[in-house]
Image (cartoon, coloured by chain):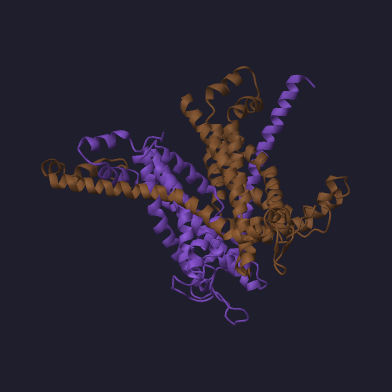
Chain colours: A brown, B purple
Amino acid sequence: MDGELGPLGAEPATRSIPLTVAIIDPRHAAKQQIYERLFRAATLSAAVLVLLILGGVALSLLQGAWPALHRFGLHFVTSEVWNPVTDKFGALAAIYGTLVTSAIAMAIAVPAGFGIALFLTELCPPVLKRPIGVAVELLAAVPSIIFGIWGLFVLAPVLQRHVQPWLIEHLGPLPAVGRLFQGPPFGIGILTAGIVLAIMVLPFIAATMRDVFDTVPAMLKESGYGLGATTWEVIWNVVVPHSRAGIVGGVMLGLGRALGETMAVTFVIGNAHRISVSLLAPGTTISSAIANEFTEAVGDLYTSSLIALGLLLFLITFSVIAAAQAMLRRLERRALTSI
Amino acid sequence: MSRRGFRKLKNGLFLGLSMVATAAGLAALGAILFTLITHGLAGLSPRLFTQMTPVPNSAQPGGLLNAIFGSAVMTAIGILVGGPIGVLAGTYLSEYGRNSRLSTAVRFINDVLLSAPSIIIGLFIYEIVVVPMGHFSALAGAFSLAVLAIPVTLRTTEDMLNLVPAGMKDSSAALGAHPWRTTISILYPAARSGIVTGLLLAVARISGETAPLLFTALNKQFWSTNLAEPMANLPVVIFQFALSPYAEWQQLAWAGALLITVTILVLSVAARMLLAVLYRQSGGGR
């Protein structure tokens, strides 16, 4: 900012509008009309372009995926076989991997994000509130490829040496649940991908929940304390019910990220097109299959099948994100009307 | 145990857990930054900025010059194309169609695009640019980044224009200025630092994007300034070199990762500081 003017200083107005000219000279007025129409048209077309982009994404994916969808039909989503040699493609393993890694990520990130939001809004000393909030937001700014390379070179070896052997030894022999933790400790695999994803979506979930918790009127909380409730009881019985829609919205926003996240997963998933019961085994996800194979895909059917995977991902994430936005919006409206 | 004691215990337990969660989140950030710095600094040297990415079995250790150049060019084109579109669309939402049905739809779709997976945008650009052109190109990469830059800029522009006091707009209108004149001479200057913040955030967002570049700009081992051809770029080089078997290449990947992260964190912090100044001057915001 240039010192002498505040950012909201109105000085330019008096400087640059030749008002008297506008009133006296009809030609000038006509010119103003034209500029007005042009400017309006420019902003309007930019706004419409945003809609066109989404429509274009849907149409172009559908067009690219058509050969594969036409050839395999429903088999595309029910078959686990992904064989470029015989030109047989089924997306089931990728869908399974996407859902399971996201589920692991949410199982870790939702409680942790809730804890962070709770700490920031209710417990944190005011001095620390801003620095910690900024740190969480910076975590959100780190590009996903950094999480991927960190997951591969730092997290995976640690899991392989220390965590996975313990899981195999102690949880492996259990009935039913044990099957999730059997097999050799590869380091990379479904579980590792889930953990990396959890760290990635954590800041989004924490930041949304914090913002939602901040909208709870202080009066409601004070009433709770006045009745003798403990901090936790106020949170669980006042803050959480009041911000339920926002919490669900934040969680689904995080889920949308987790489902579509590409680079962080591609590094640590192991890229194996099969469904293994064990979480320690390598697998694949929709996005990592596309990232790994797209440039190497030979033959139209192979490329088209990868685009069909993209179409599936688009449909899944679009519905999750749209539902999340709808919920957050409803909350925003309610917050506005309650003031 | 008394009921009171149980309640206090439960309170302490959950509040303790929330502190543990915060500590764990901060520890994750710390661990990532720590590894980046230790691994990245070891590979940091002047040759990163003077030599091209290495070819297999060459005597030259190589650098990242072409990749840094390519990333800078594509990010620049991305923000130059996507930024103005975002600003104009944000202007429409804030000034012309604030409550129209179109604006509601655009706002909603924009928020969806904001969190849509970037790999989908890559596939989209592949279908509409790469396939018709017949080959990968830097231009296609730049377009995919532009598409990713639009939602961020649009969102911030609209928010920032909404912060400008209505009285200023009314005064301008009362003096006989058309809306376009008011927007350009009053609103944009008043919201300038906010809009710049949005552009900075957009640059931060697109400069680390990898997935959409994989099948638009691809990669190239040599120096290239031809936008119609594939071009090296930092994220894809990091991806390929990190997964390569050569230790020197992995070293380059870490150095590149450090460069990107530092750039993005500096941009984000700068944007945040600008925003803090703006809010303080406008009286704490709404």
User: Residue visible at 20% across and 42% down?
Assistant: A14
Residue B200's place in the image compared with B70, above or below, is above
Q: Name the spot of residue B172 as percent of width and height, x first.
A: 24, 38
Position of the C terminus of chain B, as image quadrant, is top left
How many circles with numbers are drawn on the protein? 0
Frontmost residue, A85 versus A282: A85
The answer to whether one can see residue A244 in this image is yes
Q: Residue furthest top?
A: A227
Frontmost residue, A229 versus A92: A92
Q: Name the spot of residue A196 as percent of width and height, x first.
A: 66, 52
Answer left or right for B90 relative to A122. left
Frontmost residue, A75 versus A142: A75
The answer to whether one can see residue B209 in this image is no
Q: Name the spot of residue A16 as percent of width and height, x first.
A: 20, 46
Q: Name the spot of residue A249 as percent of width and height, x first.
A: 58, 38
Q: Residue furthest left?
A: A24
- Quarter of the image for residue A123 reads top right
Answer left or right for B50 relative to B9. left
Q: Residue furthest bottom?
A: B59
Answer left or right for A313 relative to B100. right
User: Residue visible at 61% across and 67% down?
Assistant: A300
- Quarter of the image for residue B1 reads top right
Residue A98's place in the image compared with A334, above or below, is below
